[in-house]
C-alpha cells in the first residue's frame, strides 16, 4: 500500500476529512471513490486549480477545494478528521498552534522529528492512538494517528512511538536509523551531540 492508500485505510466511510496540504488531491480522490466527502486544501491557488483538473466528473460532488494557510474549515464545519501528510513535523505543529480548533482524530505523516511531534502534540492535548511505518520508494514514513487525551510518555515512547501496527517495518526502520546515527557520530566532534545520538542508538537497539 502507498502512503496515501494507508491513510485512506485508517478512515471510516462515515468520516468527513480535511486534507491540509492536499497538493494534487490524490487522497481526496481516493476517498471520493469510497463515497467519502472531503475538503482538499492547499496554500496556493495554482496548486488547487491544477488539483481540480485531476478530479473525474462523477467524483466532483465529494470534494470541496479550499485555498489557504493551514486549517481552512468554516465555523459551522465540525467533526472533521484532519490529515496532514508530506509535511515536516514543525510545519504540522505550526499549523495546529495557529488554530483554536480541536480535532477528534488527526492523521499525520512526516518523515522527521517524530519525537518532537509526539511531545508537542501532547502539549496541544493529543495522544497517540496508533502508529504505522510505511516504506515507499525505499523511504520510511511514520504515520501517526492522534486522538484527544492526556498521558505521559517515556523517553523510549517519545523516540519510537506507541501502538505500532507494523512491527517488522518498525524494526527495519530502527536498524536503518542506528546505521545512520553511527555514521553521523563518526563525523561530529561536539560531545553533547554525540551523547544525544548514543542515547538514541541505545533506545533503538532495544527495539530491533
Ligand atoms: C509534499 S506535498 C504533500 C502532498 C500530499 N499531502 C502527500 O502526502 O503526498 C506538501 C503540500 O503542503 C502544502 N503546504 C505547505 N505549507 C502549507 C500550509 N501552511 N497550509 C496548507 N498547505 C501547505 C504545499 O503547498 C504542498 O502542496
Image (tube, rainbow, N blue to C red):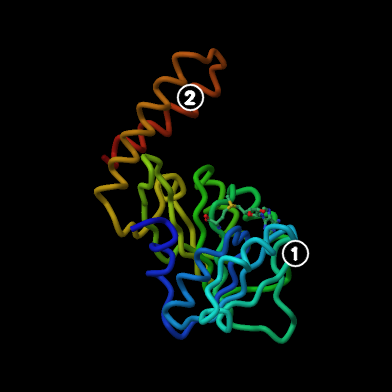
Q: Quadrant of residue 200?
A: top left
Measuring from the top left, give residue 78's x and y in whole percent: 64, 83
Residue 111 shown left or right of residue 90 in the figure: left
61 up-or-down from 174: above or below: below
The yes-or-no answer for disc 1 within 8 Å of ligand 1 is: yes
Measuring from the top left, give residue 139's x and y in whole percent: 40, 41
Rate crowding at label 1 as few (under 14), some (14 to 19) or many (20 or more) other CA atoms within 10 Å: some
The yes-or-no answer for disc 2 within 8 Å of ligand 1 is: no
Residue 47 shown left or right of residue 17 in the figure: right
Residue nearest the viewer, comparing 3 with 193: 3
Q: Quadrant of residue 203?
A: top left
* Dot label at residue 144: none
Residue under the point 41% across and 20% down: 183
Residue 100 shown left or right of residue 198 in the figure: right
Q: Quadrant of residue 103?
A: bottom right
Q: Earlier in the sequence, mark 1 or mark 2?
A: 1
* Secondary element at tag 1: loop
Amino acid at each position: 500500500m502507498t502512503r496515501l492508500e494507508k491513510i485512506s485505510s485508517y478512515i471510516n466511510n462515515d468520516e468527513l476529512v480535511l486534507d491540509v496540504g492536499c497538493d494534487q488531491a490524490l487522497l481526496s480522490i481516493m476517498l471520493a471513490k469510497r463515497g467519502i466527502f472531503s475538503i482538499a486544501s492547499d496554500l496556493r491557488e495554482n496548486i488547487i486549480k491544477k488539483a481540480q483538473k485531476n478530479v473525474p466528473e462523477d467524483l466532483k460532488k465529494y470534494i470541496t477545494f479550499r485555498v489557504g494557510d493551514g486549517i481552512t474549515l468554516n465555523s459551522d464545519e465540525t467533526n472533521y478528521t484532519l490529515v496532514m501528510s508530506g509535511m515536516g513535523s514543525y510545519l504540522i505543529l505550526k499549523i495546529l498552534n495557529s488554530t483554536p480548533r480541536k480535532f477528534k482524530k488527526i492523521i499525520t505523516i512526516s518523515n522527521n522529528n517524530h519525537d518532537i511531534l509526539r511531545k508537542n502534540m501532547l502539549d496541544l492535548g493529543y495522544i497517540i492512538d496508533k502508529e504505522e511505518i510505511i516504506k515507499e520508494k525505499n523511504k520510511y514514513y511514520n504515520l501517526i494517528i492522534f486522538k484527544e487525551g492526556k498521558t505521559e510518555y517515556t523517553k523510549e515512547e517519545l523516540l519510537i512511538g506507541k501502538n505500532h501496527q507494523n512491527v517488522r517495518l518498525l524494526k527495519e526502520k530502527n536498524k536503518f536509523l542506528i546505521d545512520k546515527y553511527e555514521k553521523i557520530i563518526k563525523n561530529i566532534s561536539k560531545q553533547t551531540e554525540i551523547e544525544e545520538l548514543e542515547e538514541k542508538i541505545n533506545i533503538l537497539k532495544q527495539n530491533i
